[in-house]
Image (cartoon, helix red, strand yellow):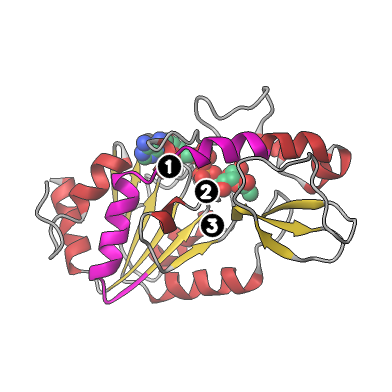
Amino acid sequence: MTLAAARALVAGARSIAVLTGAGISAESGVPTFRGPGGLWRNYRPEELATPEAFAADPSLVWEWYAWRRGLVAAARPNPGHEALAALERRSAAFQLITQNVDGLHVLAGSRAVIEIHGSLWRTRCVGCGEVRTDRTPAPERIPPHCPCGSLLRPDVVWFGEPLPEDLLGRSIDAVDACDLMLVVGTSGVVQPAASFADAALRRGAPVVEVNLDPTPLSGRATISLRGRSAALLPELISGGPEGGKS
Ligand code: OAD
């Protein structure tokens, strides 16, 4: 019944905004941050994903990112990513906002993707600021350096750092314009991404949450679906023209 109601909302929506988190990539074999298998050498992400941690020990932070690059390099998009790519193809207006840095949405065929926390596959020089694509599973030397001599860092957003203003602005615009928001596989504890759903709800746009477990959003969401995104998302979009599978 709830799934049927959510499917009807998806089938009737004209402008869809989607926010995804680590849970959507879990079934591709990429561990979530706060779930089992997410801890590397017993560090919490808040201890490594910070400018302070990088300043104190760039090699340690790079070793963590090299581990994560290795996991993601071996991962393929799963039916959850693919369902969102299919939903985009049939939607009049669609914007995917992801907190994930793994690049799996783009690999699945999604086009309108805002990687609001950056990408594992880019480096940024802390000196000259040059951003480069780097798809090697691990940098040749840790920590890697720019030809200008300064350290390279992953081009991702760390705790305590602001989101890139243009990406945040485009995300807010999409949330403000949507008549349906999907929130998939995120614990909803990291701001400002966590507040997007409330902004949609305040405007009266329905919000459908897909998550394995209850989150702080579950009580406020219009519909909260409990289960695996790789199973639920294909079901959710199966009411539209590209659907048929259930
Ligand atoms: P979390 O690890 O905090 O949360 C993952 C969420 O996915 C949890 O709510 C799980 O219940 C859910 N989940 C796990 N497996 C699932 C599945 N198969 N199907 C559906 N849901 C599933 O990850 P995020 O919310 O993405 O930021 O974390 C947000 C941010 O905190 C990350 O982008 C990162 C992190 O520290 C930075 O590094 C700045």
Is residue 126 in the magenta section?
no
Asked if the residues shown at circle 1 and circle 2 are in contact, with their CB atoms under 8 angstroms apart, the answer is yes
Q: Residue at x 26, y 49 (%)?
A: 233
Label 3 vs 2, first from the N-terminus = 2
Answer yes or no: do the residues labelled 3 and 2 have beta carbons within 8 Å? Answer: no
Residue that numbered label 2 is attached to: 102
Picture quarter containing residue 33?
Answer: top right
For mark 1, what is the residue?
A: 25
x, y percent for residue 123 = 70, 55
Mark 3 Cα-neighbour bin, 10 Å: few <14, some 14–19, many ≥20: many
Query: Residue at the location (71% across, 43% down)?
Result: 139
Kindly identify which residue carries mark 3: 193
Disc 2 residue type (three-letter): Asp
Question: Which mark identifies residue 110?
Answer: none
Q: Amino acid at mark 3?
A: Ala
Q: Of label 3 and label 1, which has the lower sequence position?
A: 1
Q: Is mark 3 within 8 Å of ligand 1?
A: yes
Q: Determine crowd level at label 2: few under 14, some 14-19, many 20+ residues with C-alpha closer than 10 A.
A: many
Q: Is residue 144 left or right of residue 191?
A: right
Asked where in the image residue 244 lies, by quadrant, the reply is bottom left
